[in-house]
Amino acid sequence: MASPNSEALERYKNAITAASSVVGAAMLLRRFVADVLPDTALGALLLLPPPSSRRHCVVIEEFDGAFYNRVFLAAKAYVSTLLAASPVPLMKASLPRGAGAEQITLAMRPGTAVVDVFDGAELTWRLSSHGGGGGGGRRRGGDDAREVFKLSFDGRHKDMVLGAYLPAVMARVAAMSQGQRQAKLYSNEWGKWRPVRLRNASTFATLAMDAALREAVVDDLDRFLGRKEYYERTGRAWKRGYLIHGPPGTGKSSLVAAISNHLRFDVYDLELGGVRSNTELRKLLIRMKNRSILLIEDVDCAVVAAPRREARGGPDGSNTPSVNRKVTLSGLLNMVDGLWSSSGHERILIFTTTHVDRLDQALLRPGRMDMHVHMGYLGFGAFRELAATYHGVAGDHPLFPEIEALLREVEVAPAEVAERLLMTDDAGAAIEMVAKLLRDRKAGTEEDGGGYVSQKLHAGTGRRHPRASRRGGGAVVATTTRRGVFGDEIGMEISHGQGRRGVRGRGRGRR
């Protein structure tokens, strides 16, 4: 009589034998079907959809390495046009600073989706986010969470999506940008650029400048734009540097806005105090768009205490806290004309300062600051432009001879005169206020204390007589003078040795 253990073992052997037979038969059947039937017939036999009808997905990330992904930016702008007519239950609305209510823009929230139709095919845009400490929030002291668009569609439309749909999206966004082009002002925050609309109406036509100075700057800008092939042929980065210096209230910031409006370039206002390291400075630089202006205002205050190189640490080899949290002058110089300055093209770099004598000479050499523009005190010609702009006084006025004589004797900033012209809508009363300001300035009896004068005296630097001079590096600077609205003498300085061109207005106003 067989034991129970023997019967269990026999049943186990029989099961193994049966399973082996089934597996062998299945393998033979699979080989036969694969040799005889095509893939589509096999899928139909097994009730599976064909591979081409399965959902495909294109992932579009916010960043392409260290750069912003242009496809992501275009997708974000395009999807915002779909949201108004879509049944998306959750979206966010924003209104750029200075924009009207008709310019409210819609955007998707992470986790939501919207459907688009193109040539009869349905495509789904879905937005998600990752990183940033979860929940799409900001990490303490770090960057925001990165967003990702996922474009899903039927696999049969893959060629159409890649060859027609995505290019059509890019073209539509480009057309939208061209039709609604308005300069933007970017500021750096937590290692990222944050934009607002730049709605400064300053132009070269409305700016109180000497005619020769205005013409020199405009000609230099236009020549820069048209010299792409020249920069490529000479192996130079397609960029131009301007140093704008002068006393407070003389229109340095207004000149920057006029340059932006003339070129239709965005302005990136870099606050060096908010940059934590040279590495972060490089990231900000390479994330700038082409055809843009990088502005560093009051650069003398930003780099006056910056060491040429980072400290190496204490005796024990440890780094001081400032090493990893400050921008050094060396890092700034590399940004201006080092290898990283070639990360983009058609860029303008502008430094402004009230105290040009405080700047390190390494910042001022040709190739870094190619053109020096001095914004001086008001002259009579510039005053007449202000009177015509603010009150339409295009001809003569009984007080003009007195004002012209006073401007030869006292120094006044254009901003001070503009403030008086804005105080009333009566042209005669406004011009009388200007005359009173100049009389009081000459007599030293200003009621407001003459704030601009005190700052000017604090920053005062010796004035050189116009003559040919020789500067460091053997460059000869030829200086020609003429009577102008920004000074007794307008100096046009051209450094033939290194190609730097300086335009400078000096002294008291006279024409």
Image (tube, rainbow, N blue to C red):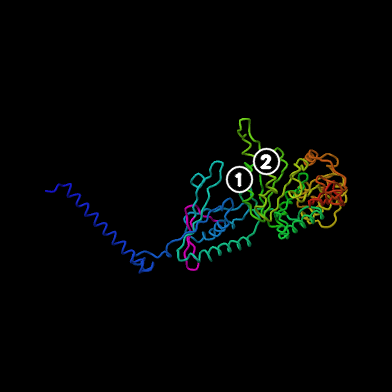
On screen, residue 34 above or below 429: below
Q: Identity of the amino acid at label 1? A: Glu
Identify the residue position indicated by label 1 in the image.
189
Question: Is residue 21 visible to us here?
Answer: yes
Q: Nearer the viewer, mark 1 or mark 2?
A: 2
In this rendering, the answer to whether 367 lies above or below 125 is above
Residue at position x 40%, y 65% from top?
50
Q: How busy is the neighbourhood of tag 2: few (under 14 within 10 Å), some, or many (20 plus)? A: many
Q: Is residue 116 magenta?
A: yes
Residue numbers of the magenta segment:
105-126
Outermost residue toward the left in this view: 1
Q: Give the camera-side residue of 290 and 435.
A: 290
Q: Main secondary structure of the magenta part?
A: strand
Marks 1 & 2, CB-CB < 8 Å contact: no
- Structural distance between the alpha carbons of marks 1 and 2: 19 Å
Whole-percent x, y for residue 391 in the image: 78, 54
Picture coordinates of residue 121 (x, y %)?
Answer: 47, 66
In percent of width and height, residue 496 lies at 82, 52
Q: Is residue 3 left or right of residue 64?
A: left
Front one among 474 and 204: 474
Give 326 or 269, whichever is nearer the viewer: 326
Residue 50 on the magenta segment? no
Q: Which residue is mark 2?
A: 328
Q: Is residue 173 left or right of residue 216?
A: left
